[in-house]
Image (spheres, helix red, strand yellow):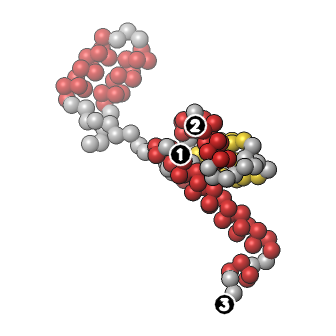
Amino acid sequence: MRRISQCLNTQLTEILHRATLLNKLNDKLLNYLPEQLRDHFTVGSFTNGYLVLITPDPVWASQLRYHLPELRDYLRKEAGIYQLASIKISVSTLANMQTPPPQPKFPPISPKARKTILTGSEQCSYEPLKDALKNLAKTVIPQ
């Protein structure tokens, strides 16, 4: 029986080889990252010594920036990626579309809170705030 790589043309074999290398690099990355960051990053590419990490959210990107010097040193020394020159973090809008942000859960507004909001709106002299408070009191929030 022939290996799958022998059945593919040379371009597909190269793509398979690069995908395998990126997968191994992704595993090494996940072993080093702190637990709270692991689910939010993946290896995008590794070309000419430049590693690109992809995240769906800029908040996670800024969190990882604090760990970049240690991550670079770890990948060079411990993981054996000596040719690593730099790490770039990319925020992917496509990843944002694939994983929608969780909808905030609002606590139910009690009748007493509604009355207090309406009273506050009646005492307010600033019209935009007054209208916003009235709309807030009218809003039915699902429980």
Query: Which residue is drawn at the image coordinates 75% and 72% (left, top)?
Result: 13
Callout 1 secondary element? loop
Please identify the quadrant where the C terminus is shown.
top left
Picture coordinates of residue 133, whole percent (x, y) = 35, 22
Query: Which residue is drawn at the image coordinates 39% and 21% (left, top)?
Result: 131
Q: Earlier in the sequence, mark 1 or mark 2?
A: 1
Task: Compute the Cα span from label 1 to label 2.
Answer: 8 Å
In-image side of 15 versus 89 (left or right): right
Q: Which residue is mark 1?
A: 33
Callout 3 secondary element? loop
Label 1 environment density (alpha carbons within 10 Å; few <14, some 14–19, many ≥20): some
Q: Are discs 3 and 1 less than 8 Å apart at CB?
A: no
Q: Earlier in the sequence, mark 3 or mark 1?
A: 3
Label 3 environment density (alpha carbons within 10 Å; few <14, some 14–19, many ≥20): few
Task: Compute the Cα span from label 3 to label 1.
Answer: 40 Å
Q: Are discs 3 and 2 less than 8 Å apart at CB?
A: no
Q: Residue furthest bottom?
A: 1
Q: Which residue is mark 2?
A: 67
Residue type of the residue flagged with mark 2: His
Q: Which residue is mark 3?
A: 1
Picture coordinates of residue 111, whole percent (x, y) = 19, 29
In-image side of 50 versus 107 (left or right): right
Q: Are discs 1 and 2 less than 8 Å apart at CB?
A: yes
Instruction: Give residue 12's quadrant in the image.
Output: bottom right
Residue type of the residue flagged with mark 3: Met
Residue type of the residue flagged with mark 1: Leu
Please identify the quadrant where the N terminus is shown.
bottom right
Does residue 104 lie above or below 13 as drawn? above
Query: Which residue is drawn at the image coordinates 46% and 46% (left, top)?
Result: 35
Task: Compute the Cα span from label 3 to label 2.
Answer: 46 Å
Could you say which is closer to the camera, residue 30 or residue 83?
83
